[in-house]
């Protein structure tokens, strides 16, 4: 699963998609996930990083991660040619 | 290394366009305590969901209402509307403050008597009073507000057997310029039904006509309708004085004052737009004082407002069961609070706040209850922080009707606690157990056994 390469993301959580001009606001953990996806980290790596950093159980992080990815897909921020 | 506080990831599309000047504000600020008691502790001790009633809010709201009327009119009496919330603890707070009781059934009448209310200070309204109910009310010298002629004739029959002179009033319905006009209760003012009933009462010689009553509607968003109602009742009172040389003792304008809740479809929050006690008091008092009552014969003004006195004092605490998304990607959150406990969710956009701190990130969410029924929607659209399973929420202003119109449906009803003036928590109604329901059932012998 790859995030569109040309997505721009600022430190304050402002996301811009130059393909269609749409912009988004993302919270810090969401921005962190997008950053990791941009560097082509695998789900397992992202999951491990979040578990070690945040005070939440594995199931919650897994569930919320896939919910977030669903949102990225819905907003056309994920390369739809890639298999999830 | 200590781990960071987790918040679920969220991304929100930024929409451009005109800002919505009518939008309700997002409830970021958590309500962690009610009257000094931690919401978390309340749920730990009494479970979730949980109704919480604030005694201090009841008393302060009552005092505000009393002041609004008593500073404008010399003789004012409140009567607590039992149907709005007939938990004994709630009723007794109002009785301690000086409220009489206003009941609409034999069941409520019995509750008021058991609470220790003097029968003479019970107002008996409603269309369904059995002969036994009326017999009891006549013997206790309660104020019987007659709804229809059948009731009037039953009372007249009972006077033969009881040798008492029943104290009665009639309920009058009327056009006050609002829609819908409530003309199903009582006798109509405009078409002469009210005068017909009054003539029958006066000519019978067997009944003591004490007052005139009306109740023009519910959740009234205009105070001026009460001025019309007060004027029409005063006109009847003065007419009775002229025709029969009989002074009625009171005018009862019923209830129907809007609380500060926000009706569905309203542009602005009810807290900003709904009339205040002062608005209602001004409209009613000015009208009565300007009517031509004889010197020293101003009638007592009775008010039966329920909703506006108790809504603010009630909270419903709940817990997030799950987060989901609809087919279109919209966030939905399932709570353990449903329309079984929050009947008023059908007509209010209830204010709902988280019970623990969050960041300022929010998501537009649809709140569902726990019932396996499609109608179980608590809020269609609300901007809420990023709630997780197990997080607690506080639903505000639920004191009116939810603890009487609730449904034992699919699941059992929870505990109700009252926080007293010293922040002590009292259990005022125990949660239901399965036996609370099954103990009332009877199994026919031939249905006791089966094989699958």
Image: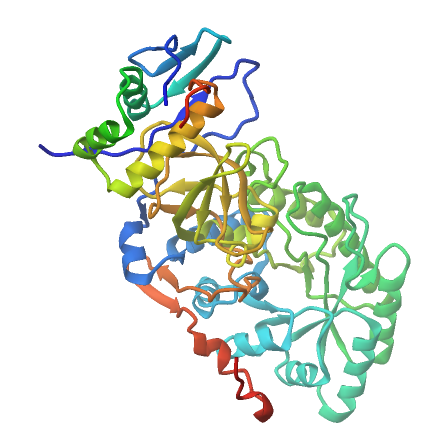
Residue B220, given in percent of the width and then of the height, sits at: 66, 46
Give the camera-side residue of B270 and B63: B270
Instruction: Say which quarter of the image contains residue B121.
Output: bottom right
Q: State the residue at coordinates (63%, 77%).
A: B106
Q: Is residue B312 visible?
A: yes
Q: State the residue at coordinates (54%, 85%).
A: B450
Q: Is residue B105 shown left or right of residue B397?
A: right
Residue B209, given in percent of the width and then of the height, sits at: 75, 72
Instruction: Say which quarter of the image contains residue A29.
Output: top left
Residue B447, given in percent of the width and then of the height, sits at: 58, 87
Q: State the residue at coordinates (66%, 51%).
A: B218
Which image quadrant: the N terminus of chain B?
A: top left
From this view, report whether residue B160 is shown above or below residue B57: below
From this view, report whether residue A64 is shown above or below residue B87: above
Q: Is residue A53 shown left or right of residue B22?
A: left
Q: Is residue B115 visible?
A: no
Residue B247, given in percent of the width and then of the height, sits at: 75, 66
Give the camera-side residue of B4 and B25: B4
In the rendered image, the residue lying farthest to the right is B191
């Amino acid at each position: 699963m790859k995030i569109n390469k040309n997505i721009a993301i600022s430190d304050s959580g402002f996301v811009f998609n130059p393909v269609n001009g749409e912009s988004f606001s993302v919270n810090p953990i969401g921005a962190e996930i997008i950053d990791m996806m941009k560097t082509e980290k695998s789900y397992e790596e992202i999951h491990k990083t979040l578990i070690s950093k945040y005070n939440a159980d594995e199931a919650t992080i897994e569930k919320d991660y896939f919910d977030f990815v669903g949102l990225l897909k819905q907003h056309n921020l994920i390369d739809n040619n890639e298999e999830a | 290394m200590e781990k960071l506080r987790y918040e679920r990831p969220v991304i929100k599309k930024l929409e451009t366009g005109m800002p919505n000047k009518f939008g309700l504000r997002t409830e970021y600020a958590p309500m962690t305590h009610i009257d000094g008691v931690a919401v978390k502790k309340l749920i730990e001790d009494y479970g979730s969901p949980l109704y919480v009633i604030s005694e201090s809010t009841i008393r302060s709201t009552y005092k505000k209402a009393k002041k609004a009327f008593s500073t404008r009119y010399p003789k004012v009496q409140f009567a607590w509307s039992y149907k709005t919330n007939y938990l004994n603890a709630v009723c007794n707070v109002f009785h301690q403050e000086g409220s009489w009781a206003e009941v609409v059934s034999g069941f409520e009448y019995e509750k008021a008597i058991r609470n220790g209310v003097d029968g003479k200070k019970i107002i008996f309204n409603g269309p369904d009073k059995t002969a036994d109910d009326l017999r009891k009310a006549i013997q206790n010298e309660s104020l019987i507000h007659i709804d229809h002629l059948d009731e009037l004739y039953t009372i007249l029959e009972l006077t033969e057997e009881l040798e008492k002179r029943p104290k009665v009033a009639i309920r009058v319905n009327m056009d006050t310029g609002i829609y819908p006009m409530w003309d199903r209760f009582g006798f109509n003012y405009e078409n002469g039904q009210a005068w017909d009933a009054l003539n029958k009462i006066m000519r019978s010689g067997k009944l003591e006509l004490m007052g005139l009553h009306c109740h023009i509607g519910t959740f009234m968003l205009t105070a001026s309708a009460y001025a019309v109602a007060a004027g029409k009742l005063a006109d009847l009172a003065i007419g009775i004085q002229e025709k029969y040389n009989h002074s009625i003792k009171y005018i009862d304008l019923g209830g129907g004052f809007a609380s500060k809740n926000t009706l569905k479809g309203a542009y602005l929050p009810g807290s900003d737009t709904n009339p205040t006690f002062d608005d209602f008091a001004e409209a009613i008092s000015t009208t009565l004082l300007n009517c031509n009552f004889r010197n020293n014969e101003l009638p007592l003004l009775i008010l039966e407002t329920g909703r506006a006195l108790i809504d603010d004092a009630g909270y419903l605490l709940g817990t997030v069961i799950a987060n989901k998304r609809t087919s279109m990607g919209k966030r939905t959150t399932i709570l353990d609070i449903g329309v079984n406990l929050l009947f008023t969710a059908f007509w209010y956009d209830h204010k709902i706040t988280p019970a623990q701190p969050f960041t300022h990130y929010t998501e537009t969410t649809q709140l569902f209850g726990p019932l396996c029924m499609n109608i179980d929607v608590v809020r269609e659209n609300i901007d809420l922080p990023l709630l997780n399973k197990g997080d607690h929420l506080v639903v505000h202003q639920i004191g009116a009707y939810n603890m009487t119109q609730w449904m034992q449906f699919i699941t059992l009803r929870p505990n109700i606690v009252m926080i007293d003036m010293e922040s002590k928590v009292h259990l005022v109604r125990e949660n239901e157990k399965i036996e609370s329901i099954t103990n009332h059932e009877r199994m026919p012998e031939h249905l006791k056994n089966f094989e699958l």
